[in-house]
Image (cartoon, rainbow, N blue to C red):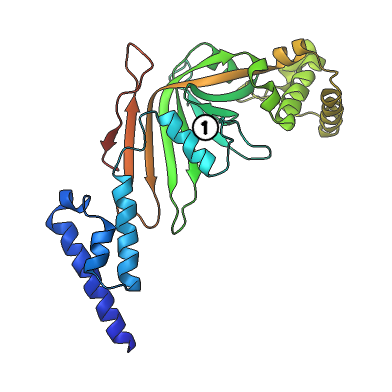
Amino acid sequence: QPQDNKKTNSNSYATAVTNILHTDKATMFRISTITLSKQLPRHVGANKILQSMTVRTMASKSPGSNPLEVIKKGCLQRNLCDEHGYRRPGIHWTFSIAVSPDDPTQPPNLRTVGVQRVSEDGIDFIMKKGCGTCDFLASGKALSILHLQGRYMPGETVEQWRGEGVCETRPLNEIIDHLPTYSLVAMLSSKSIEHEKGALVEELKDKVSGKRLAMENKSHMTELIQSTRLALENGEISDETLDESIQVFRFRPSRLECMIGGPDSVLWNRWEWQTNEKSDEWHPAKALLPH
């Protein structure tokens, strides 16, 4: 057919489906693509519209009753974790944590941490002991998190997870066998520098915030990391040293919110879950406006 005729036919199919959408939005979600396929000729333009309608129809349903299980399922599909929720070896998987300081004039303390495991009980991660943020989290202060996954590409979706809750400390031996070596080595080496400086460790703190430690000698730090890695591989680092250097946390959310969408989405779906005040059970997901 001439190119102009193809454009006309495609537009007519688009108009037909659009009319259905505008006629009765409630009915639209109950119309199956099979029925529409019988009514509309098979055409490239019509098929794209039907596929888009299928995505929107599925996304209109609640993703699940437990948002942590929804996160785990999505991460498993994207090959970030295994079936038990543990991070796969060599995978970069992170989320951000924001904690408000006691001083209201100071900005929130924002950290990006590696996700080690996600389960129906929470999100597990590790942090070097002794830092201000670690002490804040261990005290049970309320915090906010942000977790992103997916790719913003045609045919795919991204998920933006936001939430609030608290962290609880967990024993290191619960996940020690699943932790990446490079994370353990970096934290152990940093802790070793603090021990080397002893009372002079205050000299390493920056002059602005007084919280972060400067690197005096990169060559020495590199040598220390290499020796620490070798000692860890040979089992020469005691459990006491590990416990003194590394803290395992589990983020336990009281509220989680998710935005799901992509380039093909006409409307991004936004869902919210909240826990029961008297228990850890989740209330049914509630649909929210996208903004």
The residue lying at 49 percent from left, 46 percent from top is 150
Q: Residue furthest bottom?
A: 2
Q: Residue furthest left?
A: 23
The kind of secondary structure element at disc 1 is strand
Q: Is residue 190 visible?
A: yes
Image quadrant in which you'd find residue 241: top right
Question: Does residue 182 appear to the left or right of 279 in the view shown?
Answer: right
* Residue 217 coordinates in the image, percent (x, y): 82, 30
The residue lying at 47 percent from left, 56 percent from top is 153
Count of all numbered marks drawn on residues in the image? 1
> The disc labelled 1 sits on which kind of residue?
Ser
The residue carrying pointer 1 sits among few (fewer than 14), some (14 to 19) or many (20 or more) residues within 10 Å by Cα, namely some
* Residue 190 coordinates in the image, percent (x, y): 75, 23
Residue 106, compared with residue 150, is above or below; it is above
Q: Which of the two residues, 227 or 266, is positioned nearer the viewer here?
A: 266
The residue lying at 51 percent from left, 26 percent from top is 119
* Residue 10 coordinates in the image, percent (x, y): 28, 75
Question: Does residue 175 appear to the left or right of 291 in the view shown?
Answer: right
Question: Does residue 182 appear to the left or right of 122 in the view shown?
Answer: right
The quadrant of the picture occupied by the C terminus is top left
Image quadrant in which you'd find residue 171: top right
The residue lying at 36 percent from left, 19 percent from top is 281
Image quadrant in which you'd find residue 213: top right
The quadrant of the picture occupied by the N terminus is bottom left
Residue 229, compared with residue 262, is above or below; it is above
Quickly name the residue at label 1.
96
Question: Does residue 4 appear to the left or right of 195 in the view shown?
Answer: left
Residue 54, compared with residue 13, is above or below; it is above
Q: Is residue 110 visible?
A: no
